[in-house]
Image: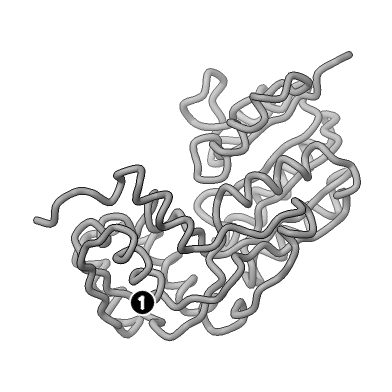
């Protein structure tokens, strides 16, 4: 029996790396990594790298960097999806931004272009606190963010990866759109407090206005495109539109989604938050 060949884009990312780890344990699947430093490089900004990576591929997991909300994403996704379909790709699973109207334009492109598709929407990941831009503030023991009162159903990247693998392998998820959330709503101060409890360390939280936060990022010389994206996420996505939970993870996986406190306890055991405050 021929193995199913699956391309995972964003192979080094929070969900992509986890999807690869799971797929590599399945004997009936052959996984191809899509990243700039893969044996066969893939670069969203260089369309010449797409064709070789897509050769003989059955299914693709699409994660777009930096985010589907950026203005350039629509044209790039259209070009990629058209090429993939023309080369015989049978299914595309797209990781989309929950509550991002701009991302939904890209979703429609995939729906209209792919032979089969599944849309997986998620918003803020638990792992943003341990593998992304909130890690340094946590280590420093001081987190300053806007939208301190916004409620977010933080979603675990392991749950997202489990859902993506299920969608890649099971045809019953074809032409479905799923919204993934954690099991409860938390504010950023409450999430930070959970991490402080799990690590038994003092972590202060300071609420900022969005203007103050953007100015702070500029002072830290964060790249402008990153500032644009962070500003977009805090201004447009954390306005209450995502302040409700769904049961899609339980519906797909047959189990409850990972609770943030469970994530905090397990991550604390890894030692990632154990650096002593300066």
* Residue 166 image offset from top left, x and y in percent: 76, 43
Quadrant (top left/top right/bottom left/bottom right) for the N terminus: top right
Between 35 and 83, the one nearer to me in the picture: 35
Residue situated in front as seen by the camera: 110 or 181: 181
Tell me which residue sits at (50%, 52%) in the image.
Answer: 66
Dividing the picture into quadrants, the one containing residue 246 is: bottom right
Q: Where residue 115 sits: x, y (%)? A: 89, 43
Q: Classify the position of the C terminus by image quarter.
A: bottom left
Q: Residue at x 71, y 21 (%)?
A: 30
Residue 169 horizontal/vertical position (percent): 81, 36
Residue located beneath label 1 in the image:
189
Is residue 132 shown left or right of residue 275?
right
Q: Is 51 left, or right, of 139 in this rendering?
A: right
Which residue is depicted at the point 51% across and 59% down?
125
Relative vertical location of residue 130 with respect to residue 197 in this rendering, above or below: above
Callout 1: few (<14), some (14-19), or many (20+) C-alpha neighbours within 10 Å?
A: many
Image point (63%, 59%), residue name: 257
The colour scheme is one colour
Residue, far top: 1
Q: How many marks?
A: 1
Specify whether 206 is left or right of 250. Answer: left
Q: Is residue 248 above or below residue 36?
A: below
Q: Name the secondary structure under disc 1.
A: helix
Using the rendered view, name the quadrant where residue 121 is placed.
Answer: bottom right
Asked if residue 167 is positioned above or below residue 154 in the image, the reply reads above
Q: Nearer the viewer, residue 154 or 183?
A: 183
Q: Position of residue 93 (x, y in %)?
A: 74, 46
């Amino acid at each position: 029996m021929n193995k199913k060949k699956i391309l995972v884009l964003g192979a080094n990312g929070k969900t992509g790396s986890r999807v690869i780890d799971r797929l590599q344990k399945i004997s009936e699947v052959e996984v191809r990594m899509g990243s700039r430093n893969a044996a066969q490089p893939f670069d969203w900004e260089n369309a010449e790298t797409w064709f070789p990576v897509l050769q003989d591929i059955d299914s693709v997991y699409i994660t777009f960097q930096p985010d589907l909300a950026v203005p350039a994403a629509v044209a790039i996704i259209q070009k990629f999806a058209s090429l993939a379909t023309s080369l015989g790709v049978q299914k595309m699973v797209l990781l989309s931004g929950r509550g991002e109207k701009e991302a939904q334009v890209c979703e429609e492109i995939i729906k209209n272009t792919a032979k089969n598709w599944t849309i997986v929407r998620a918003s803020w990941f638990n792992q943003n606190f341990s593998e992304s831009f909130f890690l340094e503030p946590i280590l420093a023991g001081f987190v300053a963010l806007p939208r301190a009162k916004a409620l977010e159903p933080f979603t675990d990247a392991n749950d997202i990866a489990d859902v993506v693998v299920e969608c890649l392998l099971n045809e019953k998820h074809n032409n479905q759109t799923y919204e993934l959330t954690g099991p409860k709503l938390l504010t950023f101060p409450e999430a930070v407090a959970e991490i402080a409890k799990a690590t038994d360390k003092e972590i202060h939280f300071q609420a900022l206005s969005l203007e103050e936060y953007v100015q702070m990022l500029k002072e830290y010389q964060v790249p402008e495109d990153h500032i644009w994206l962070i500003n977009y996420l805090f201004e447009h996505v954390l306005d209450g539109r995502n302040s409700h939970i769904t049961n899609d993870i339980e519906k797909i996986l047959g189990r409850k989604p990972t609770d943030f406190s469970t994530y905090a306890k397990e991550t604390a055991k890894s030692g990632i938050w154990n650096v002593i405050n300066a």
